[in-house]
Amino acid sequence: RSFEERDRRVRVLSQENRGVSSARNRGIRESRGEWLMFVDADDEISPDLPSLADRAGEWDLLLFDFTEGPLPPSGGAPAETLYEGGALLGLLERTLVPRPLPEGGTVNFTSVCGRAYRRALLEQWSIAFDEALFYGEDRLFNLEYLSRAGSCAHISAAVYRYEYHGDSVSHRYHEGFLSNHARLAERMKTLLEERGLFPALEGAYASCVLSHMASLLTYLIF
C-alpha cells in the first residue's frame, strides 16, 4: 500500500479469501495494461521482465525461463524463438505432458507464472480460471489460451525465480483430489473437442489423465 501511495500505476485490490483462481480472475478483470503476468507471493522476478515484454513483437504469448537459484545479472539480448501454426500444437502437447523447451530448458508448462499473456486475447475469448478447481487450474487456463493464440515466443532469459515448497497443494494429499481431477479431465477434453484439437492430442490427453490417476492412487495408498 505504501507503493500505491507513491506510484499511481500501482493498485492494491483486496477481497475475502476465495482461493487463488478467484483472486487471479479479479486481477484479470481489473487489469488495464497490454500484457498480463502472474507472480506468486514468495517468488521473485528480474527487473528485466517488464521491459522484455514491452519490447516484444505482435506475439500473443511470451514464455520465459525459470530458475530456483539466484536471478542472473541483467544484460545482453536473449535469443527469441517464434512458434506459429502447427508448431503451437507442440506447445499444447507440452502443456498436457510437460517436457523441457528447448531440451534442457526451464520453461514451466504447468504454471501461469514466468509468461506474459495479451490482455486483449483474454478479453476477446473470456478466458478465466475455473474457480471450482484447486489443482490443475493453471494447466487448463494455459490450454485454453494456447488454443486461441496465433503465435508464441520463447525468450531465453531466466527472469523468474521459483520458490519450491514441499508442503504446497500439489505436494500433499487433499480429500477433494478425486472430484477435482475428474472435473479437470472433463474440462480439458471438452475444450480440446470444441477447438477441434482432440484427435491430434488424444494420446497426450490420455497420458495426462493417467498421470493424475497414478498420483491420486499414490496419495490414497501412502
Image (cartoon, grey):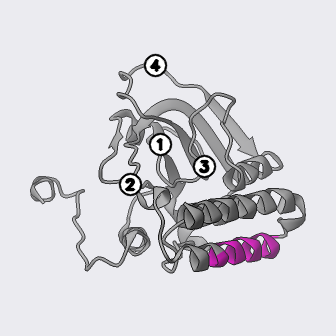
| Foreground of the two, 107 or 3 | 107
The amino acid beneath tag 2 is Asp
Where 82 sits versus 147, above or below?
above
Circle 3 or circle 2, nearest the eye: 2
Residue 167's disc is 2
Q: Which residue is mark 4?
A: 76
Q: Is residue 22 left or right of residue 222?
A: left
- Tell me the CA gap for discs 2 and 1: 32 Å
Mark 2 crowdedness (10 Å alpha carbons): few <14, some 14-19, many ≥20: few
- Label 4 element class: loop
Which residue is at a point 47% across and 31% down the rendered structure image?
158
Question: Which residue in the rendered view is the most extreme toward the front?
Answer: 221
Residue 87's disc is none
| Foreground of the two, 216 or 193 | 216
Asked whether the viewer can see residue 181, the reply is yes
Magenta-colored span: 182-195
Marked residue nearer the N-terminal end (3 or 1): 1
- Label 2 element class: loop
The amino acid beneath tag 3 is Phe
Q: Which residue is mark 3?
A: 109
Location of residue 45 in the rendering, given as x and y in whole percent from the top left corner: 35, 40
